[in-house]
Amino acid sequence: MREESKINLGKNIAILGAQWGDEGKGKIVDMLTPDLDAVVRFQGGHNAGHTLVVDGKKTVLRLIPSGILHPHVQCYLGNGVVLSPDAFLSEVAELEQQGIDVRHRLKLSHALHLLLPYHIALDQARELKLGHAAIGTTKRGIGPAYEDKAARRGIRLADLADLDGLQQRLKTVLDYHNFVLTQYHQTSAIDVDELFDVLLAQREALLPLMTDVTADLQVLASQGKHILFEGAQGSFLDVDHGTYPYVTSSNTTAGGIACGSGFGPLMMDTVMGIMKAYTTRVGSGPFPTELTDDIGATIAKRGHEFGSVTGRPRRCGWFDAVAMKRAMFLNSMNALCLTKLDVLDPFTEIGICTAYQLDGKTLDYLPHSTAELARVQPVYEFMPGWGSDTFGITRFDALPSAARQFIERLETLLGLTIDMISTGPGREHTIVRQSTR
Ligand code: GDP
Ligand code: IMO
Ligand code: MG
């Protein structure tokens, strides 16, 4: 194993969350960007919150790819993204206020769907109605926007170019949604003319950014450029493969890249899974290794585990190797990055879930039903803690031996080496450790 500051992951790379989101994807994308030509988001919307820390200064990105802080990189939002013009334009304005040129370096797919105020109103009204059974969404309108896409009544970016068509489509879609909002949810209707006027103004800023992302990616690929696909959310929030219905409404796993950008599956050199040294989840749904005791509270405090979008406290627990193995298969992960190792510094022992118990049986796989997953008892293996400071360490051999043993045990359980280890939020707080591939 050799250690160097740069990592060779090939030309086309996916960075995907391997757990329930917030694994530290944004930091890793930002850190890899100097060697890239393009960064692409392919799913999700402003439910994502990706935190970058550069020279101690924090930037949280929601829709804009985490490569944007590096001036040489072209950023794209693919067709699989749902884009709120309000959220997008305010994020652009925030970055521009910091002197970052966004408009010349960011392109939007003509085929991405717009997430509009009625989607947000529906998400909020539904969560309210569900009460204790709520999914715990970010209330950003993500689910309703993807529903409209699947129902073939969505409004795409390219529709802003045809004003008559847009007005007609808005009327039709609001006729339907306003009925639901007022009659079923007893809440206010969205005014079609007001929304049309707002979109009329917003389209001036949006249309110049429109492109055929797939065609652009094809050109970049033919020129041998380096492209990174930045996942949002995590594998177990995937609408198909996650803990349904406690999921988001897009495909967060590797398959989503091809659908959400038009970049074919055989083009990918590396699919890197980002995983915390423990597990977190925000919102409702099963979480086998959740710790509701002092240990969970200490992890939350040390890891500042509060949602970067909603500020909600994240639920915390030990690392789940059973779920992780599933995530590796789901995504064809051939590289791994472990983040937030430093958060575990004070513990005398550290748990790794290696199996589940369900109705007297030991399982080394995830049960297929969400209800069963909610009932499993984790089987733990405890490793000795290291009890010393790992914050900011940049070399594997500088880690305490118990920390190295913890990482090596994870590698054995997962059957893959861990190429990168993050020991703090900053770009520089990273161990790059690469096996020759
Ligand atoms: P993302 O959604 O996957 O990009 O992750 P978030 O940004 O939502 O959450 C990760 C949080 O952990 C952010 O506040 C990061 O600044 C922070 N972070 C990332 N890596 C590390 C690390 O290795 N150690 C510590 N202490 N914090 C980290
Ligand atoms: P990043 O990209 C963590 C969760 C919500 C909720 C469920 C559905 O920062 O990792 P939605 O608003 O998408 O309909 O909510 O998904 N969720 C996330 N959890 N990180 C995220 O994004 C998330 N985006 C959505 O909390 O449980
Ligand atoms: Mg996040």
Image (spheres, helix red, strand yellow):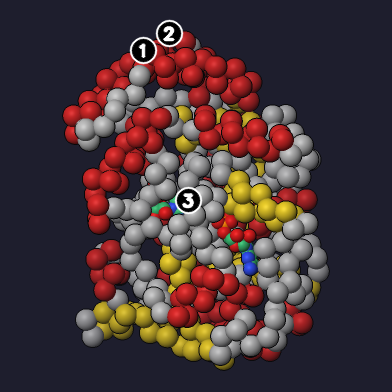
Dot 3: element: loop
Question: For the residue with label 3, is its CB less than 8 Å from the closest atom of ligand 2?
Answer: yes
Q: CA distance from mark 1 to mark 3?
A: 34 Å
Residue in view at x 38 percent, y 58 percent: 283
User: Which is nearer the N-term, disc 1 or disc 3?
Assistant: 1
In the rendered view of the protein, which quadrant contains the C terminus?
Answer: bottom right
For marks 3 and 2, the one nearer the N-term is 2
Mark 1 touching mark 2, by CB under 8 A?
A: yes
| Residue highlighted by disc 2 | 164
Crowding at mark 1 (Cα within 10 Å: few <14, some 14-19, many 20+): few
Q: Residues within 10 Å of mark 3 (few under 14, many from 20)?
A: some
Q: Is residue 420 visible?
A: no
Residue of label 3 = 310
Closer to the camera in the image, 53 or 318: 53
**Which amino acid, mark 2?**
Asp
Disc 3 to disc 2, how far (Cα)?
Answer: 37 Å
Where does label 1 land, which residue?
168
In front of the other: 135 or 111: 135
Asked if 371 appears above or below 399 in the picture, the reply is above
Q: CA distance from mark 1 to mark 2?
A: 6 Å
- Residue 28 locus on image (x, y percent): 66, 58
Q: Position of residue 72 (x, y in %)?
A: 79, 40
The residue at the point 41 percent across, 76 percent down is 291
**Can I make out residue 375 in this image?**
yes
Q: Position of residue 168 (x, y in %)?
A: 36, 12
Q: How many marks?
A: 3
